[in-house]
Image (cartoon, rainbow, N blue to C red):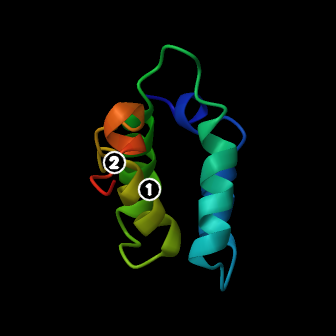
Amino acid sequence: MDVAEFDPKGLIRESYRIEGITEAECRTIFLDWAIQVPVGADPKSHIQACLSYYGADLPDHPMTTTLQAGLIPSPKAKRRGGRAAKFSGSA
């Protein structure tokens, strides 16, 4: 995959160049980057490409940590509401 495919505006690249960048700033940059992933594309493959291209030599960088967190599956949504939520057992 060409770098222009997984980081077309260079947001991830630039985050690695910012000296003293924080994890919070990396999360903001990551969200800006993530909304640019084309519809129908697999975001995890784009994240993995960024990690391989930029983060391989910088395992302790906050953006590497942020990208790795993006690969963790989100928890399954649990049903909320309904009768059980309205009546907690105390009457």
From the viewer's perspective, tell me whether residue 16 is left or right of residue 66: right
Res. 52 in view = yes
Whether pointer 1 and pointer 2 mark residues with C-beta atoms closer than 8 Å, the reply is yes
16 relative to 33, above or below: below
Residue type of the residue flagged with mark 1: Leu
Of 85 and 79, nearer the camera is: 85
Residue identified by numbered label 1: 67
To which residue does mark 2 refer? 71
Query: Could you tell me which quadrant the N terminus lies in?
Result: top left
Relative side of 89 to 83, left or right: left
Percent from the top left, x then y, of residue 89? Answer: 27, 52
Q: Position of residue 21 (x, y in %)?
A: 65, 78
Q: Any mark on residue 90, and which?
A: none
Please name whichever residue, 6 or 82, is drawn nearer the observer in this view of the structure.
82
As drawn, the residue found furthest toward the bottom would be 20
Residue at the front extreme of this rendering: 91
Task: Give the class, few, some or many, for how many residues have Cα within 10 Å of label 2's Cα (few <14, many ≥20).
Answer: few
Residue type (three-letter) at the residue carrying disc 2: Leu
Tell me the residue at 68%/59% (across/down): 28
Q: Residue at x 50, y 74 (%)?
A: 62
> Which quadrant holds residue 81?
top left
Q: Is residue 78 visible?
A: no
Residue at mark 1 to residue at mark 2: CA–CA distance: 7 Å
Residue 68 place in picture, x, y as percent: 36, 58
Q: Is residue 68 above or below residue 5?
A: below
The foreground one among 20 and 90 is 90
Give SS at disc 1: helix
The residue lying toward the viewer, choosing from 84 and 28, is: 84
